[in-house]
Image (cartoon, rainbow, N blue to C red):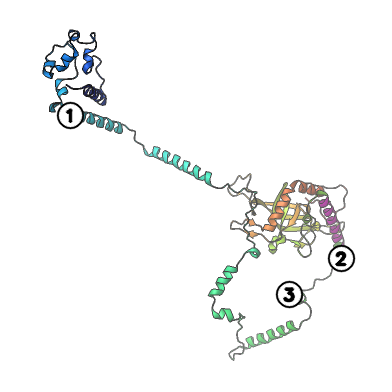
Amino acid sequence: MPGSDDIESTISFDKTLWVGIGKKWPENVTDVPVGLAWFRDEQLLFPDFVNNSFNEIRNKSVEEFLRLEFPAVTYSITCEELTGSDEYQASRVNSLRCAAIAISADEESQILSLPEYDVDELDDIFAEDSQYIANSIASALPAPQLLDEAPGAASVDPLSTDLSQLVSLREAHQTKQAQEGVRTSVRPCLNDESQTEKQKIIRELNAIVRENRETAIGTGAVRALHWTSATPTAPAGNAANAAAVSTAAASRALTIRRTAVKAAGLPQIVEDAGVSKVNPLRTAAAGKASGYAFALHENEIVLVKVLQLHSRSGGKAGKLGYVPSHDNIAGVTNVYCQVLEHTHGRDFCIRPTEGERLLNPPALFALLLSPHILHVLHTAPHELGNHDLSITNDDSRCFSILKTMLPAVRGFVAGLTKKKRGAAAGAGGDGDDAED
């Protein structure tokens, strides 16, 4: 006789098989009580056998037990299932095979029902992935350098660059002739008999000139002046008086400028703007550093490239005239220049960066008075590939100082450029005689 565990496992298998193939367990099928539980309750299923002892039932064989008369109850367990015949095992294997086929068919139908991505959807998915990767990389990158932030510690000054390794490498690979030889200029031999009469005359003239240069007296500047330029004629009469008056007016204007600088609390470099007899203010065409200067233009500190200088001659009928250079910043009346705006670090651009309405905006030019010129550069700027300019570290520090004192600079320029009524015209041009 099968035990309770065997019967329970068989019933559980049937229920699992129904669920596996997607069918619902029949509600009208009554589960058969398990084993000895059939005889525990007279109200359960077997009222005719309640009075019989359990010992008598246990002593009966399987055949006798099956020949007993049971009530009409629907059973899901057959005799073949209880005995475990080969036909029953084959039926179970076939049921499992059918369940596996049903599950495989269901999975395949679910796979086939999945949506297919088109090209546009794939592009959108890849774009989202690339954007996510870009955001992840951007979060790990260092913070960008601000436009007004000071440049890095690396210096490009040739004097502070260590070239010892390059020198050692050059000396290690140089030839013996380069190590012990002396570089001299090569002069053609003129003693050849095949020389023409013209070549002989030129040789004699060069010898005379060389002898005179070697025996000349005085300093090198005197000899250079003697051979390369002529002594200018000293002015006389009204011209001399006008020059003297112009120089005196420029000196008075420079004194007024120095007083205004001290009153505004500006640095000393603004007093004479770095202009002197050794370093005169000149046009940028000369290729000198004094052809570029920091100036106040539209209430902002900018870099200007000097194109022309105008100075007024002395006297009551003094007129503006072009001068190539001037050794007194207060003696200059008008400065015609090109304006360069600061972009970042030490770089300045020749075209405006704000308010552009064209793809290629025009360059900016201005006609400034001498008080607008704050200080000339110490070193000529370096021209970049796009015609923009880059200044040195020393000039960059001077530019930063002027920017930090921008309110004081505005007050200083406004005080000198304010036109005074009844002021006499002079060569100064520091606001006493503003020229349109």
Q: CA distance from mark 1 to mark 2?
A: 131 Å
Q: Is residue 29 visible?
A: no
Residue sitting nearer the eye, 432 or 97: 97
Q: Main secondary structure of the magenta part?
A: helix
Q: Residue at 70% of width from left, 53% of height from top?
A: 399
Q: Is residue 327 left or right of residue 284?
A: right
Q: Position of residue 39 (x, y in %)?
A: 21, 13
| Residue type indicated by callout 1 | Asn
Precedes in sequence: disc 2 or disc 3: 3
Q: Are marks 2 and 3 in contact (CB under 8 Å)?
A: no
Helix, strand or loop at mark 1: helix
Q: Which residue is mark 2?
A: 240
Q: Position of residue 44 (x, y in %)?
A: 23, 10
Q: CA distance from mark 3 to mark 1?
A: 120 Å
Precedes in sequence: disc 3 or disc 1: 1
- Tag 1: Cα neighbours inside 10 Å, few (<14), some, or many (≥20)? few
Q: Which residue is mark 3?
A: 228
**Residue 94 tag number:** 1
Q: Is residue 317 left or right of residue 19?
A: right
Q: Position of residue 344 (x, y in %)?
A: 63, 51
* Magenta extent: 244-262
**Residue 233 tag number:** none
Instruction: Answer whether residue 333 is magenta in the image.
Output: no
Q: Nearer the viewer, mark 1 or mark 2?
A: 1
Q: How many circles with numbers are drawn on the protein?
A: 3
